[in-house]
Amino acid sequence: MPNRTNNLKEICKVVSETFDLSIFFVKPTGDISFEFIDNRILNPLYQNDKQNLFTLLNFEPDKQYRFPVIRKTYFYENYILISVIQDDQFEGTVIMGPSLPYVLFEQKINGLINDFHIFAQREQVMHYYRSAPVIPNEKLLKVSVMAFYLLTQTLISSETVTKENLKFGQLEQCHDSKPFISTKREQPQAVHHDPLVEKKLLSFIKEGRLEELKSFTQMEEKSTGVLSKSSYIRSKKNLAIAGITLATRASIDGGLHPEMAFSLSDVYIQRLEDFKTITEIDQLLGEAFFTFTEKVHQVKEEQFSKTITNCKNYIYNNRYEKITHDDVANQVELSHSYLSILFKKEVGISVSDYIQQVKIEEAKNLIEYTHTPLSEIGSLLNFSDQSYFTKVFKKHTGITPKQYKEKYHLLQK
């Protein structure tokens, strides 16, 4: 056992020194067995007090996990929690952190200071955030994978870590591909939300795409601006109100009756004002997005018979395949001619035109939201050749794919 403890300490020490992270080893009883802090500054907002830290992390010392857990605090900090198990015996938890996912600009730090009324400690708080190690989310995942392997001799993929943490609502999806940063740099100006993320989210609401919305994680904290210099909570509420307003408009565009949409909006905004924590605000915003999407989905289903709804879902789910009118007719067990009459009566266009329309909508999404070359998009969507793809695209949009990209592509530099 002494050798095992010494090995554990040595591994923790190496990881601590490599990534400039404080490390604590907590026994199942809640006692700290050892720690590596060095001269790192403690967060003046809670002084890294053990009980405060456990509460912030929603950490239960006697609970164990089979994967590295990544926890985010109200103070923008990230921590990695790794359960150490030897011969099926739970020995305790290694807590690594804090680190910041990005450099905080001054307005966000001021919001925290104001929320906690610790104006006398402003300089200490500023110094803490400017001194804390910065590890972007994607890099933090890799650090967790490496540390997990060193401590447990079990190799796990970054994708698995993300998936497991998302189940517990602990981790926002990592889109950050910036290089690893562990030193200070100049404070950036406030950045605002990514229009790419916003448009993608609003398209799910407008189209009533519940399944896509379920797999879509919310915007990362760094992708939003500051709408209140005096309070972080007020800023979050203002951002949430903006999000609900956009979702309301998207749902109306998707066919939801305006009175229903605005009534929902009023209810969510009124509920929002009563909240005191970030978690409550985030949960309400997620609930609002889901409700608006669900209502649009219901409206769209009610517009058509069950048979036509099945046809439309089949076409959408197979938009990357080569599908024909006959394929759709076979799916719903109807003759070619009868489906043609029924579909045209309810939808207003032929089955073949609707298949083209769905494929072109997907082509527009690929052009707007990805770096996929135009020469590959037609092939991905199973158009016979580039010339035919261009012809069909222009038929439905009035312009060529190249012109559409020049006008709408959101990823252009």
Image (tube, rainbow, N blue to C red):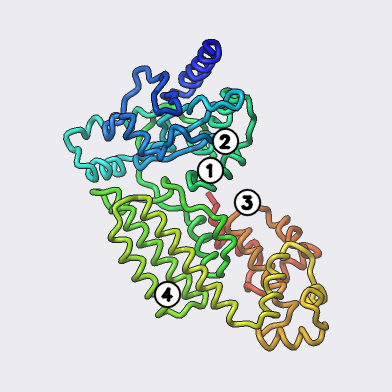
Question: For the residues carrying marks 1 and 4, which lies nearer the camera in this image?
Answer: 1
Check disc 3 and give the amino acid type: His
Check disc 4 and give the amino acid type: Ala
Are the residues tagged 1 and 2 within 8 Å (C-beta)?
Answer: yes
What residue do we see at 32% from left, 58% from top?
A: 238
Nearer the N terminus, badge 1 or badge 4? 1
Q: Is residue 228 above or below residue 78?
A: below
Check disc 1 and give the amino acid type: Asn
- Label annotation for residue 371: 3
Residue 144's spot in the image, x, y percent?
54, 31
Q: Is disc 3 placed on a helix, strand or loop?
A: loop
Q: Is disc 4 placed on a helix, strand or loop?
A: helix
Residue 134's spot in the image, x, y percent?
43, 32
Report which quarter residue 363 is drawn in.
bottom right
- Label annotation for residue 165: 1
Nearer the N terminus, badge 3 or badge 4? 4
Real-space Cα separation, disc 1 to disc 2, in angstroms: 9 Å
Residue beneath disc 4: 261
Residue 89's spot in the image, x, y percent?
56, 26
What residue do we see at 75% from left, 88% from top?
A: 341
Nearer the N terminus, badge 2 or badge 3? 2
